[in-house]
Amino acid sequence: MRHQVCIIGGGPSGLLLCLLLRRAGVDAIVLEQRSRAYVLGRIRAGVLEQGLVDILHHAGVGQRLAAEGFVHDGTLIVAHGRRVHIDFKALTGKTVTIYGQTEVTRDLYDALDAMGAPVLHEAEGVTIHGAETDAPYVTFTRGGQAQRIDCDYIAGCDGFHGVSRRTIPEALRQEFEHVYPFGWLGILSETPPLHHELVYAGHERGFALCSMRNANLSRHYLQVPLTDRVEDWTDETFWAELRRRLPPDLAEVLVTGPSIEKSIAPLRSFISEPMSWGRLFLAGDAAHIVPPTGAKGLNLAASDVWYLSQALIAQYQGDAAPLAGYSAQALARVWKASRFSWSMTRMLHSFPSEGPFLARMQAAEVDYLAGAPAAQTALAENYVGLPY
Ligand code: FAD
Ligand code: PHB
């Protein structure tokens, strides 16, 4: 097979890149190691920046999002006895939209299907060859058959555990990593959201987040030790612990019910530089991971994909500069979003091993935030997404 761009990974990054390229007349193919049902079954992000919403409209997949997404003008932070309402709209003129990653993925699949775009699932043993040459190709097996795709460019959109990043020789890569000593236990339940906006709660027993997907679907998270397993938490113990971490008036109105999904994700900050090598370009989780506290993972994947799609389109129109500058351009935004995600994580989680000094610093930070419009504006600007 021959295609102009071979995209490895059929998560949101790979599917969105494929759609943007094909809409511009670039012949792209996606190779995904899992089944479509598996990809659609993963419950992940839920907050979309306006930038991502705009890209989805640009790509022609904004209809369901516009009809079913919920626009949020702000968020509530409750910590250290303070209640801080961050009014995104008043402070920045921008908003965010609540619409699950699963729904974004489904819309992307539907649009790709409608245009007959090739998305090959269950592609095993994907291997990148000759990325540093002018004739790269990718091999894999599918249904027992060995296959090869020759291409002009390869996009590594295969997430943190994918092969693309590791194809770049170690000597040419620099990795920056910070692993947090806890994870997030998340549950999905068919219950109404706690509040009309997301509630980020810092508590001495640990962080909690009350999020949502729609009027009768809630997504809640608890900070848990890395040693905890999902089996350690019944629905009852989850709800009881969540109640303890919320202010009494919110705890009182929390509606509980059986969980329909429960999982634990470890928290990590990770950035690999550069995001390109020869004709291989990384995007999304393949190049970086943020802790979810800033709701940035999916949004950062989208800004990478936007830069990369525009650079590849320019390349085919004879302008080589954007593709040559892709890694530096993407990394500038990645580092700022990583800083924000790290600072939100640092402000709102409990770090028992760091002692009482840090806890007092966190309290002072929240106290400052509560009284300083400048600090609220800085938080809001980052939360709604830095421009790109
Ligand atoms: P992925 O979604 O990881 O997609 C990569 C795809 O590549 C996958 O489909 C994978 O199967 C495929 N793949 C991997 N290896 C290969 C290979 N060798 N060959 C072919 N295909 C391959 N972000 C938030 O903002 N909020 C959240 O609450 C949140 N929760 C998360 C929970 C978990 C458990 C994880 C892992 C991430 C979470 N994120 C969250 C982050 C967000 O979901 C990611 O940033 C986003 O999915 C990145 O999209 P991606 O397409 O770059 O990577
Ligand atoms: C979610 O709804 O899954 C979600 C929302 C905000 C975050 C993280 C996760 O910061």
Image (cartoon, rainbow, N blue to C red):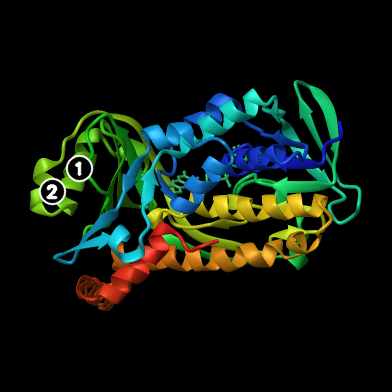
Residue carrying label 1: 194
Q: In terms of image quadrants, where is residue 45?
A: top left
Numbered circle sitting on residue 153: none
192 vs 273: above or below: above
297 vs 24: above or below: below
Identify the element where label 2 is drawn. helix
Q: In the rendered image, which quarter contains the N terminus? A: top right
Give residue 286's position: percent from left, percent from top: 62, 51
Say what amino acid the circle numbered 1 marks: Leu
Q: In terms of image quadrants, where is residue 114?
A: top right
Residue located 8% across and 52% down the image:
248
Residue 35 is at least partly visible in this image: yes
Q: In terms of image quadrants, where is residue 33?
A: top right
Residue carrying label 2: 250
Identify the element where label 1 is drawn. loop
Q: Is residue 242 left or right of residue 336?
A: left
Q: Earlier in the sequence, mark 1 or mark 2?
A: 1
Residue 182 is at least partly visible in this image: no
Q: Residues within 10 Å of mark 2 (few under 14, many from 20)?
A: few
